[in-house]
Amino acid sequence: MVDGLGNPLTFLLTGGQVYDSVPAIELLQELDITGSHILGDKAYGSEAIRNWITAKQASYTIPPKANSQNPWNVDWYRYKERHLVECFFNKIKHFRRVATRYDKLAKSLLAFVYVASIFKLTQ
């Protein structure tokens, strides 16, 4: 998760077989999102996630899936700011160890993701 400037806030490493939206609420619970605006892609558009964000008195810009029964309005201008997330992951993937996932242990990979993030923040 990154902030509005593309700086990292928190990480959660999951297995490759875990769908992206499963740990979303767990990750958001680590932060005080009251009054914040959450940007997410279509994978995070489940009703449970949207209701949880609204219950925390935050707003969201998450586009509905193409097969959604009740699509909602999306501020596409604001949604374009989501590129900061992609840019952050592109920056840390310049570190070969992160991009290729050579580490056997998840904690080793996560530790180096933190190191890469700190390195990119200080540049």
Image (tube, grey):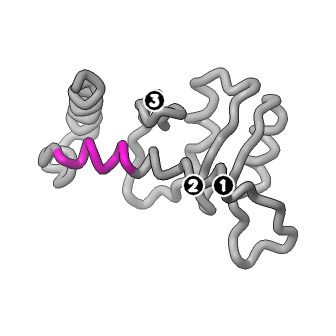
Q: In whole angstroms, how far apart are the C-alphas of marks 2 and 1?
A: 6 Å
Residue appearing at x 16%, y 43% in the figure: 95
What segment is highlighted magenta in the picture?
A: 87-94
Q: Main secondary structure of the magenta part?
A: helix
Q: What residue lies at 23% left-to-right and 48% top-to-bottom?
A: 93
Residue 107 visible in image: no
Say if residue 14 shows up in the picture: yes
Given residues 10 and 62, the one toward you in this image is 62
In the picture of the structure, the residue carrying the numbered disc 3 is 10
* Residue 2 vertical placement versus 86 (above, below): above
Q: Position of residue 105 (x, y in %)?
A: 21, 40
How far apart marks 3 and 2 lie (CA) works out to 21 Å
Q: Earlier in the sequence, mark 3 or mark 1?
A: 3
- Classed neighbour count for the residue bearing mark 2: other residues with Cα under 10 Å, few (<14), some (14–19), many (≥20): few
Q: Which mark is residue 118?
A: none
Residue type at mark 1 is: Tyr
- Tell which tag, 3 or 1, sits nearer the viewer: 1
In the displayed structure image, the side of residue 56 where residue 101 appears, left or right: left
Q: Are marks 2 and 1 in contact (CB under 8 Å)?
A: yes
Q: Is residue 77 above or below residue 3?
A: below
Q: Residue at x 47, y 33 (%)?
A: 5
Q: Which residue is mark 2?
A: 80
Judged from the image, the secondary structure of the residue bearing numbered disc 2 is helix
Amino acid type shown at disc 3? Thr
Tell me the element at label 1.
Answer: helix
Residue annotated with mark 1:
77
| Residue 7 as seen in the image, left or right of residue 107 | right
Q: Is residue 2 magenta?
A: no
